[in-house]
Amino acid sequence: MRRTYQAVTQDYLEYTSSKHWPVLLYTVAFLHTIVQERRKFGSLGWNIPYEFNKADYTASVQFVQNHLEDLDPKKHTISWPTVCYMLGEVQYGGRVTDDFDKRLLNTFTSSWFCEPLLHGQFEFYKGYKAPTSRNLTIIQETLNNLPIMDSPQVFGLHANADITYQINGVKNIFEAILGVQPKQSGGGGESRESVVFKLADDMLKKLPMPYVSFEVKDALNRLGALLPMNIFLRQELDRMNRVLLAVRETLCDLKLAIEGTIIMSTTLREALDAMYDAQVPPSWKRISWDSGSIGFWFTELLDRHNQFRVWLTGGKPKVFWMTGFFNPQGFLTAMRQEVTRAHKGWALDSVVLQNVVTRFWKEEITEHPSEGVYVHGLFVEGASVEKKTGKLVESRPKVLFEPVPVIFIFAVNSTSGKDPRLYECPVYRKPKRTDANYIGSIDFQTDISPRHWVLRGVALLCDIK
């Protein structure tokens, strides 16, 4: 803010006769600061780290000037919807490509660019007042009285976001250190090849065998091969088989290459380097899923295989682990299709998903729902869930992620819109909130405005590793 106002002069504040010009200029500058500073909090701040710059600020200020000059001199009433649209959809919003980031930006503009801003006591956050004075000295005093260190709450986030910021900084340092480490072993200690050989041998002992096609076919026929959920299962098994075969081939070839039986190809060298650094080999990652380390990745592989095996041999699980699917969107679509088929006269286009956050954990679910599915294994970031009510509440201090009770997802035939009193919470596969990781949304009840949780950056994650 101080840097932005270094270019502001008293003459600039006298630019227009409108008494609202100084406070609107200050609010645009505050918005510009907030959208830039939220980037340091990673995905909690913005799903995509946009490069907002001075050109966005200048264009926004120019629009505000023009809008004030075009007002009817008798009424002098600001069109707040116009101001919010231009800032949230055009000036700054023109850079924003993610729908949930756009929702966040529009929440900022609609919360700040409103009639209470003009009444002299408006605060962006406690202690951060919007000065209405046209006197530059008074405005500079306001800026000088701002805290030296801004808490995450100023940006709409929970205090825990500062921990996220520090963790991200440490991760970047370690990644940089890892990137400059030599790929050859030093004179002492166990060699890279020896370490990876033992790891490959251990993984091969635990690695499940690939599925046998005719056994899968027989099992699916018993379950009902043409049912949408079982078609989805078959597709998941095909992809899982591909991963199992690739992992087995890589591990076997690595052992042979380390022994000198076969040539160490580029792909095998990449796999060796990655495994030594406890990372997932690139050739595996391309056909599977991302993970923080090879240990987490391999554990997830075993858990995924176990869920598919239980489903294939014993029928639908009572509770599904949605993290364990390659295509969780397809899982929800298959469920919609099954419900639609069960109701005569329903059309798939008008069938929508709804949900209830239950009070139960996975172990407490004893029977299948009559329709829909129970899912577990989700984590909430940016908030917590009150178990008795299923409502969103503030995060506990120093707790970044909290497990969410089992969620019941079902389908209804409805063309009405969403209840505005509910918070539409995005669900992502991984902490990186990209379009590729986006699954869908879950609605949460809340005792306070859903806007609060939008500013908090609340989302559900299938995996936090």
Image: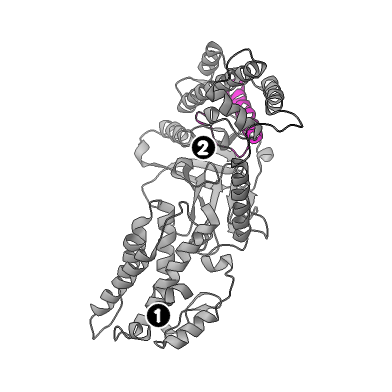
Residue 20's x, y, as percent? 35, 82
Q: Quadrant of the C terminus?
A: top right
- Magenta region's main secondary structure? helix
42 within the magenta span: no
Residue 58's x, y, as percent? 34, 69
Of the pair 300 and 283, the residue shown nearer to us: 283
Which residue, as the protein is rendered here, is positioned at the far front?
A: 187
Badge 2 density bin: few <14, some 14–19, many ≥20, Cα 10 Å: many
- Callout 2 amino acid: Gly
287 within the magenta span: yes
Question: Which residue lies under the disc numbered 1?
Answer: 23
- Callout 1 amino acid: Val
Separation of residues labelled 2 and 1 (CA atoms): 52 Å
Of the pair 369 and 143, the residue shown nearer to us: 143
* First of labels 2, 1 by sequence position: 1
The span shown in magenta is 286-314
Question: Which residue lies under the disc numbered 2?
Answer: 372
Q: Residue at coordinates 63% horizontally, 36% vertically from top-left?
A: 182
> Horizontal placement of 61 versus 419: left or right?
left
376 up-or-down from 169: above or below: above
